Image (spheres, rainbow, N blue to C red):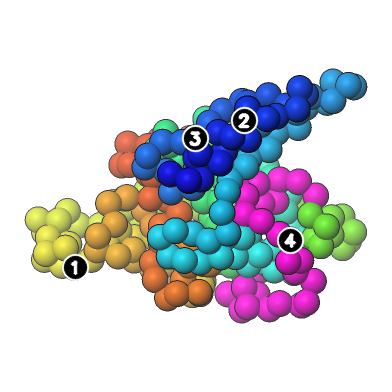
């Protein structure tokens, strides 16, 4: 793959202060990633994910589109930023943030946080379409949305106490995710559901574009569907951000959320 070849060429030309922490060049990964670590003279460590290319090779969608849609919501719902940071740090500590191990990646957790806020009425699907002209042309796709300070996303404390994240918000988020188990338990087994048995019904899931529960395509093998809003808006097609999930890993996520 040309993307992998380009990343390998970069690896051999790295400055001395950069170290290769991890490579994700597996054949089944749609976007190969090179993870670098930089150590400053003061001892500060910065980690960065690097990918190559301007468009998704499967759908032809411009890379970074989903990130820009997410930033539109973050600009209007500043409380989402600390929630996403807390959830992503928790998933990292719990070892539940690597798609190649069968869990949700950073983008998956981000979309779940935004869907949670939509269900509470704090965010709306319309926000995905509200471009206020501040989107830079140099924005690129990465999986760390909400992790660093965004130039066009104000800190939530600048909006007053009503915009601050409360402990109850975090608890509510984990309860909502843990309760997905009841949703799955309501699903009849394929042998009792003609539509599923005939391959006409996909797995349950969530959509930010509609702001509601939805169904993945019948061909989807993952037990849960998290719609990629960028692909949906740009092409009308289905793409599952949670496609790496397996029944065992998804139930591990639900169990850990219920313990939190």
**Residue 20: percent from the left, percent from the top?**
63, 26
Tell me the CA gap for discs 3 and 4.
24 Å
Q: Is residue 183 left or right of residue 129?
A: left
Pointer 2 or 1: first along the chain: 2
The residue range painted magenta reads 122-149
**Residue 183: percent from the left, percent from the top?**
35, 56
Pointer 3 or 2: first along the chain: 2
Q: Residues within 10 Å of mark 2 (few under 14, many from 20)?
A: some
Dots 3, 2 in contact, CB < 8 A = no
**Residue 182: percent from the left, percent from the top?**
35, 52
The residue that label 4 is drawn on is 138
Dots 2, 1 in contact, CB < 8 A = no
Tell me the CA gap for discs 3 and 2.
13 Å
Tell me the CA gap for discs 1 and 3.
34 Å
The residue that label 1 is drawn on is 200
Pointer 2 or 4: first along the chain: 2
């Amino acid at each position: 793959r040309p993307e992998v070849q380009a990343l390998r060429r970069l690896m051999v030309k790295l400055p001395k202060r950069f170290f290769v922490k991890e490579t994700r060049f597996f054949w089944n990964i749609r976007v190969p990633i090179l993870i670098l670590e930089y150590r400053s003279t003061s001892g500060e460590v910065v980690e960065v994910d690097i990918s190559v290319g301007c468009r998704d090779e499967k759908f032809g969608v411009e890379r970074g589109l989903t990130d820009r849609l997410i930033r539109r919501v973050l600009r209007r719902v500043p409380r989402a930023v600390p929630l996403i940071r807390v959830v992503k740090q928790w998933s990292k500590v719990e070892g539940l943030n690597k798609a190649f191990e069968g869990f949700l990646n950073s983008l998956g957790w981000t979309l779940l946080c935004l869907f949670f806020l939509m269900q509470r009425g704090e965010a709306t699907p319309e926000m995905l379409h509200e471009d206020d002209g501040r989107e830079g042309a140099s924005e690129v796709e990465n999986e760390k949305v909400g992790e660093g300070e965004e130039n066009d996303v104000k800190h939530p404390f600048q909006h007053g106490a009503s915009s601050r994240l409360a402990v109850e918000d975090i608890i509510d988020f984990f309860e909502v995710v843990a309760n997905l188990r009841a949703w799955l338990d309501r699903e009849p087994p394929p042998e009792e559901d003609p539509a599923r048995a005939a391959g006409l019904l996909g797995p349950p899931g969530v959509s930010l574009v509609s702001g509601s529960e939805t169904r993945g395509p019948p061909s989807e093998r993952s037990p849960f569907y998290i719609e990629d809003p960028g692909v949906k808006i740009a092409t009308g097609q289905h793409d599952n951000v949670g496609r790496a999930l397996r029944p065992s890993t998804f139930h591990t996520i639900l169990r850990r959320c219920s313990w939190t």
